[in-house]
Structures are given as C-alpha cells and as structure tokens.
Image: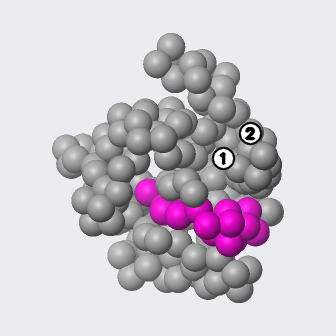
Amino acid sequence: MAIIVLDRDGVINFDSDEYIKTVDEWRPIPGAIEAMATLSQAGHTLFVATNQSGIGRGYYSTSTLDAMHKKMESLLREQGGELAGIYYCPHHPDDGCHCRKPLPGMLDDIKTQHGLSLENSFFVGDSLRDLEAGLARGCQPILVKTGKGLQTIDAGLPNALSHTLVFADLAEFADHLLSVSSS
C-alpha cells in the first residue's frame, strides 16, 4: 500500500487568504474526510504536512492549531480512518527554517521518525510549493483543483512537474488510487 502525504489547507479543509485562525473556521471540504477514511481503510498510510505560518505571524497559537488537528482527527476517526502523523511548519516565511514547503524538511522528518522511504509515495497539494516539496523526496505529485489548485494550474507548472496528476479534489484522487490499486 502507498504512503500518501497531504497538504491541509485547500486539500482537506477550506483555505482562506485571511488564514484559518480558529477551530470554528476549520471546515472540511465536502468529501475530503471520507476520502481520507477510505484510503486509510484500504491500508494506505496517511500523513499531513502543512505550512502554518499563522503561528509565526502571531495570528493563532500552537494550542489552537492542535485543537484544529484534534477536530480533523476526530472527524476522520468517526469515518473509520486514521492519520499516521501530522507535521507542520510554524515559522514565519522570513525565518529561514528547513521545514517550510517548498523545502522538504517535514518530509525528511516523516522519513526519519517513521523509518520510511517516500520514493513512489504520493504528495497531494493545491500549490506549487506542495508539489515541489514532494518532488524533492521522490513523491508522485498530485494537484487538486480545490483551494489554490486552479490558480496553480493557471500559473503553469514547470517542466520538472510535467508528470503531475491533476484531480478535481481529494475524493477524486482517492477514487482513482483505489481503482488503480484494485486492478
């Protein structure tokens, strides 16, 4: 079974240019939680890797982010799914950290902490920086049209990402992966 790394905002939940700052503002995209549960139940290992510079900018606290993630995990458990881990970069873009996508620091942490190879895994995102982070560690880039996905398509993908697979949303990707896995 595959390892699937998911961006959060714009892939799992609705995104906002004003940032998702409260638990109430964290709202799943229709079908996303169910898709994650279906993938999990089929034996795929799911991780979340998300930039959360709102912490570094002072818009919300780590405890608020933890509460958002508890909400997401609770909804996923209710559907019979689970995450193997949630990784986030709390840094401001100017901090020069190693974990902020498009850098692959969060993926390196997943590899090291779980003893995994991410070669031939999937990275599902809605932005160029998501795809670049995944590509840096050998992941198949998957672009969803939710969140900033349409803007990413309109801007054009560089040649290095010409093999990116594009889906309407996380649910369509899950349906595709499950149909390919069963054949």
> Which disc is residue 147 wearing?
1
Q: Write the start and end of the magenta stretch as one range.
A: 33-49
Q: Is residue 143 magenta?
A: no
Separation (CA) of disc 1 from disc 2: 12 Å
Query: Which label is found at residue 159?
Result: none
* 27 or 81: nearer the viewer: 81
Rate crowding at label 2 as few (under 14), some (14 to 19) or many (20 or more) other CA atoms within 10 Å. Answer: some
Residue at position x 61%, y 67% in the image: 43
User: Please, what is the three-letter code of the amino acid marked with disc 1?
Assistant: Gly
Amino acid residing under circle 2: Phe
Lateral position of residue 58 relative to residue 123, left or right: left
- Please identify, in this view, whether the residue under mark 1 or under mark 2 is nearer the observer: 2
Q: Earlier in the sequence, mark 1 or mark 2?
A: 1
- In the rendered image of this protein, does residue 146 appear above or below residue 65? above
Give residue 167's mark: 2
- In the picture, measured across the screen, residue 72 lies left or right of residue 21, that is right
176 versus 44 height, above or below: above
Residue 91: x %, y % from top left: 28, 56
Q: Where in the figure is residue 102, as x and y percent of width and height?
A: 37, 38
Q: Residue at x 71, y 85 (%)?
A: 78
Asked where in the image residue 41 lies, by quadrant, the reply is bottom right
For numbered disc 2, what is the local secondary structure?
strand
Q: Position of residue 176 (x, y in %)?
A: 77, 45
Which residue in the rendered view is the most extreme toward the top? Answer: 159
Determine the residue positioned at 69% across, 33% down: 166
Residue 40: within the magenta?
yes
Secondary structure of residue under mark 1? loop
Image point (63%, 52%), residue name: 10
Q: Position of residue 140 (x, y in %)?
A: 53, 37
What crowding class fits label 1: few (fewer than 14 Cα within 10 Å), some (14-19), or many (20 or more)? Answer: many
The quarter of the picture where the N terminus appears is: bottom right
